[in-house]
Amino acid sequence: KKKRVAKKKRVAKKKRVAKKRLHSSYKGIVRGLNKREKSLKAALAAARRALVAKRKAFSRASKRRFQVLGRIKAIRSSIRRQHKQCRALSAKTKKQVALIDRIEAKVHELHRVSDLQVGDAEKAVQSLLAQLSALTGRKYKHSAHILKLTRQLRNKLLRELKACRRTARRMRISLRKAFRLLSKASKARYTASRALTPAVVKVHVLRARIQESARSRNIARRLAYSKHYCPKPKKVVRRRIRLGTKSRPSTTACKGVLRSHGGKAKSGYYYIRYHGRTARVYCDMTTAGGGWTVVAYAPCGGGPGYHSKAPRACRSLYQLRTGGGGWHHASSRKAFSLPAAALARKSKEIMFVQNNADHRLIDGRRSSRAWYYRIPNPHVVTFARPYTSGKGRCRRVTLVNAKTGARKKAYTYSRALGTAWSDSYPTGVGATSSRTCSSVVGQGPQLTTDDTGRTKKGWYRGRWYWHHGWWMANSRDLKGSVSVMLR
């Protein structure tokens, strides 16, 4: 009994000491959090002051820009009025100058005529002077100084017209200056707005940190003054959910499966969620980092020369726009293609794999040849026929050998991701060495699809036609199984 009592006392003492130590440590945490919160509040106050100053600078720049815009508007309206006045003055001056020229001509005629015709000439001059008085609003009488008066009047009219045009020119110069001021004001406003955004973000970040610090401090304070012993909580280890099974298909194809397995998944068949249904696909988890989804496969075909009478079991690839061949239950014995346009728009790379043996749906590392490139514009991919208007632009890509890492430049259509000849024999997915994206024999990779021969009716059937077999980079007359993969 004494031993039990002593043991209880020892345990109680240990608990008191542990509680005291824990409470003191929590008090230290509270002091540290108080100090941190104080520094954060000081930083927040400084950030708010800086934000207020930057907002004032932004408002000043905006006000200055608004003033310059108002000035430009006023100058433009003044220029329009001045141009209108100058046009009216120019028309009026032309009329008056023409009339003055006629008066001078009559006066010169008056000096040359005989005595019998003097009266008629004087009457004509008087009528012209009456018209001039009506235009100018001044009275003119016939005198010996009529030529001098008309010359002065013409010079005066021309001076007024020049002055009007000079005023309009000055207004245009002031408008150019105003536009330069507008450019400077817009730049200042843009600079102020660029400086304003980080300041606002900084204030929000500091507020969030202060709130987080306050929550942590309150929790530590409750623990520091708690009456109960609160041991340190155990670390919760979350279990990784592995995707790729029929009950948990991956929505991001084989890349999501690889990520859910921690980058250590094996190549094989997995389930993905695609086109509104669950599909069983083959995933290559070893080549060039893994995560490749097989979207098209042909178990056999190709060969040297021109093949249009291949066995029915062998065929070219199904086109990738709508797919074909029962891709819901993919296997190594049957050709299939997924409707891969939607998947390609979410992918970044495409790979072409060829194996000399038939019926080998294996990864690119164990294949005979494998090349891949980065898709130029994934968001526009439709896998359209490369000889139609929807093929897209010819883009340059960099081919990478998945086995050796060697690189080579090539070209492909941005929407079709393939090449073709003008007569569509052959047509395939891949790339070519031609800058015009026209097929070059043996310069691929180019894997023939059943889009071949769609431009000519009644000729070779595209599904059983190969032009010098499968093409890879610097290789032709190849045979065996091929596949197309996306990642």
Image (cartoon, helix red, strand yellow):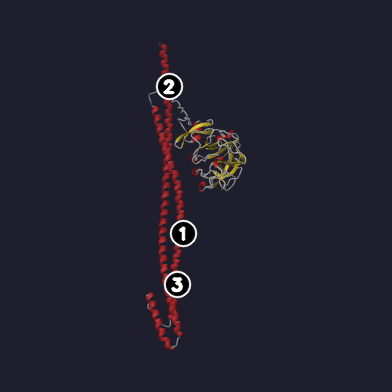
Instruction: Choose the circle earlier in sequence order: 1 or 2.
Output: 2
Q: Is residue 141 visible?
A: no
Q: Nearer the viewer, residue 464 or 353?
A: 464
In terms of secondary structure, where does tag 2 sit?
A: helix
Task: Report the mark closest to the observer, 1 or 3.
Answer: 3
Q: Is residue 83 visible?
A: yes
Residue 182 % position (x, y) = 45, 55
Residue under pointer 1 = 177
Q: CA distance from mark 1 to mark 3?
A: 29 Å
Q: Amino acid at mark 3?
A: Leu
Q: Quadrant of residue 351?
A: top right
In terms of secondary structure, where does tag 1 sit?
A: helix
Residue 366 % position (x, y) = 59, 33
- Is residue 253 positioned above or below 5 on the image? below
In terms of secondary structure, where does tag 3 sit?
A: helix
Circle 1 packing at 10 Å, graded few (<14), some (14-19), many (20+), is few
Residue under pointer 3 = 158
Circle 3 packing at 10 Å, graded few (<14), some (14-19), many (20+), is some
Residue under pointer 2 = 17
Q: Are marks 1 and 2 in contact (CB under 8 Å)?
A: no
Q: CA distance from mark 2 to mark 3?
A: 110 Å
Q: Amino acid at mark 1?
A: Lys
Q: How many marks?
A: 3
